[in-house]
Image: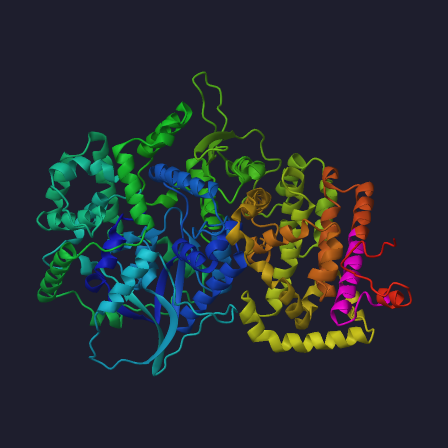
Amino acid sequence: MGVRGLTSYIAQRAELYLKPHELHNTALVIDGDNLACNLYKDVTGCYSAFGGDYDDFYRAVVEFFQVLAECQIRGYVLMDGGYEERKLRTVGKRLRGKIAVIKKINPCDSITLFPLHLKEVFVDAVRDCGVPVMRCVFEADDELAALARKLNCPVLSYDSDFYIHNVQYIPLITLTVKVLTKQRRRAGEAQRTLRRHEAKHVEKRTKAHKILSGRTSQEVTAKKPEYAVKSSYKYLDCCIYRVEHLCGRGALSPEKLPLFAALLGNDYIARSAFRNFFAAGMGKAGRSRKLRKQQRRIRVILQWLREQTAESALDKVLSRLKKFQRDSLVSQVQAAISGYSNELCHAYEFFEKHYENAFPLVETASEAEEEEEELTEVEQLANLSAESSSEEEEEQDELSEEGSSSEAEEEEREEAVAEQPDAEQLQQSSNEEEEEEELEEAAEDAPDVEDKTLLFPQWFLDKLYPAHLPRYFVDLLHLRKYINNPQIEHFPHHDANALALPILNYSFALLHHVAGDATPPKLDAQGQPLPIEYTYLTRALRVTNVRYYRQAIEQLPAYEFVPAAPDARHLRAVFEAQVPHANVAQLFEQLQLLPPDLQLYGLAIVYWLHRSEHCDLLHLHALLLCLVVLRTVDVTIPAERDCRQFQRRFGKILRQERAVRDKEAAAGIRRGVKPALLQLPVPERMSQVPKSDCYLVQERLLPHFHMQEIFKKKYDLYSTSVLHAFAEFQSVVYQLNGLNALLDQPFRSPRMNQLYCGAFIYNLYDLLRNRLDVRYHVEHFLLADSRLMFDFYCFLYDWCAAFVPPWKQQSAAEQAAAKVVEKKRLKKQRQAARKAAAVAVGADGADPNAEMLQQSENEEDAFFDLNNKFCGLKV
């Protein structure tokens, strides 16, 4: 949810509120969505403008949990579920902001855009590390706090909500992911406080939004942790926060924290709602030039709350609010108070039931808690005096430059919105205004249930808790809404997810037509049944705005839906209805020729080729090449994307292998496939690809994993129309994977970290678009060092070519013309080579006019001026 401005406030006073901590030999509850987003920011950088580098992100996640395991830290990852009704307005505002960023995307900009499959790849990596993971029904904040209290361990996140929760909180920005070794501390040794330079470092990283900057690179191999006790221990350096640091004795009490958070503003109540209260009830927030307005507001609120009781403070705030806002604030405060000490924890029950020895490091009381007790009155007064003195210094200091941050920009935007209405909001149609009113009414009429899991059937929770279902299924079932997050798209086209909308509609129909538990339709005034429909929220065409569309169930599922029984017939029904020009019977028969992890991916390719107007065969070539390389090279040899590091690590191997192959080529020996491998099907040969082939192929292709240098000088060459076709493909894979999970996975889910790398695919498409014979170029240039990989590429392309629609296939005449043009191009290359050789010979010292001079010696004219064109004329 987020308490606005509190993160910066704590960071500026890190010496008072944050304490140094050595993280080791403990359980750790992790906010999965928060960690995934921050890791992706660190890994990709500007490469997020190409649709997502899932391979690099996967390795970063595995590496992070390996570091935790090395320090004997047992992680428990909780993922967010669907949205609550009261947060839909905030979701719409954030969606507009993301649309504005994508519309003016620049590949050289530092803005990070999260790709579509980010959370699914994160969950795959967490599972591969053997770490327990669970998806919550709604936001995971309360579940994280409840599990942390139950396990008596800290929470790792970067969310200001945990500053007001009754938990031990480690801000992710303070964690240095670098393993340190230390001898065990002697009994009675006091724990130090945060030093001045360390506090400044926390504040600096908060402003720069740098997370996990100390992360070290290691060999990425997922393995389960082992726990042992030694005289020395390994730990991670971080800072820990406890609620006593903010509300010790004589200061803010825990009962006032929910009201304190509400006054600062969050996703559920606008800060502008308290304008009258701030103007009349609290006076001015001060005129310090160094502190921003929100920071001054926090300081004044804290001073005011110290003089009030929880009841009197709430009464004074309510007296200044409008009547329709009072109930919302009271319900928020009550919900926060209940969450502050909530003991209902579904995650604990799930982990205990589905994981063997789920809690090996749980203790009733940790050493850290015994050493770091509640602050005494003397210490608290010292802290308060230190805080007041630091505030006086801040007011007396000169104006210093502050780095731009998203929080400051958001605050300025909100102040502008509070003063004058947004132009885009004034341009919205009446239908959108009615829709927003309906959302507000739905939020007000929502049933108040303490245990939100009671709103869902048990079969749905059994699929949701293990994180098999994406989070949007909660919205479809509970809110009957789908929020479409845009990708890197071409704005003159319709949104990329529109291509996969029929698959989403079929999933929605299955949710409401479960065998034995179908949803009854509502009746209109005449008693006629109304269609069951959901609201589709997506970007508007060509403009920076959102649109609401109603999608009704037009056709019932073709077969009975039994949640616990895998049934691929529903997928076949989707293809029969949406891909009529393909031979669906032959498609599902030929699907068995593909490896199990590529079968659903192959279905997505066929659907995409038939339904998309913006993809061509070059897109298909780029996809298949990326698949072959990631699925083979990164599995066989250590993954390395930096060209210099690759040469430093494997340069000797490359030189030796290149020398051997050059010697064989000079001797006329041609490398081929071993006879024993020829007896196997082509996909089964890929496990036998030699490491030498992978090293040489990776050396050729490594520059294509990075953004082209030309974009740094002329980024107009960056084409969103090319990326739009790939965005459509990602949407098809995303929706097919969701439908497959709902059907209890009749096909294996695709591993996007082994299939898709956005920057690499874009560069391959740009490289192949000028090649008339793509297969020839792949064979002789890209995959020239590995016959096995080229055979696998040809196998995949031939499989897809059988289902390419006729209007995208090249005719015989076009193929013949292409061969003629290719022959002319090769002829020109040979002529240019001969000409260059002749010029090189002339440069070696031979006179190109020697023959002419020799002839002139035998003629009567003794002088022949080569620089005078008239000299050869005879009078």
Q: Is residue 126 above or below residue 621?
A: below
Residue segment shown in magenta: 825-851
Residue 816 is situated, as x and y percent measured from the top left of the image, at 83, 45
Q: Which quarter of the figure has residue 451?
A: top left
State left or right for residue 723 relative to residue 140. Answer: right
Most distant residue in the bottom direction: 231
Residue 388 on the magenta span: no
Q: Residue 644 in the image: state x and y as whole percent.
A: 54, 70
Residue sitting at the far top: 526
Question: Residue 838 magenta-drawn?
Answer: yes
Res. 73 visible in picture: yes
Q: Which is more toward the observer, 827 or 296?
A: 827
Q: Residue at x 25, y 52 (%)?
A: 6
User: From the viewer's perspective, is residue 556 above or below residue 348?
Assistant: above
Q: 858 or 800: nearer the eye?
A: 858
The location of residue 686, given as percent across then percent down, is 69, 64
Question: Residue 178: percent from the left, percent from the top?
Answer: 39, 71
| Residue at 76% over, 42% down | 810
In the picture, residue 284 is in which quadrant? Answer: top left
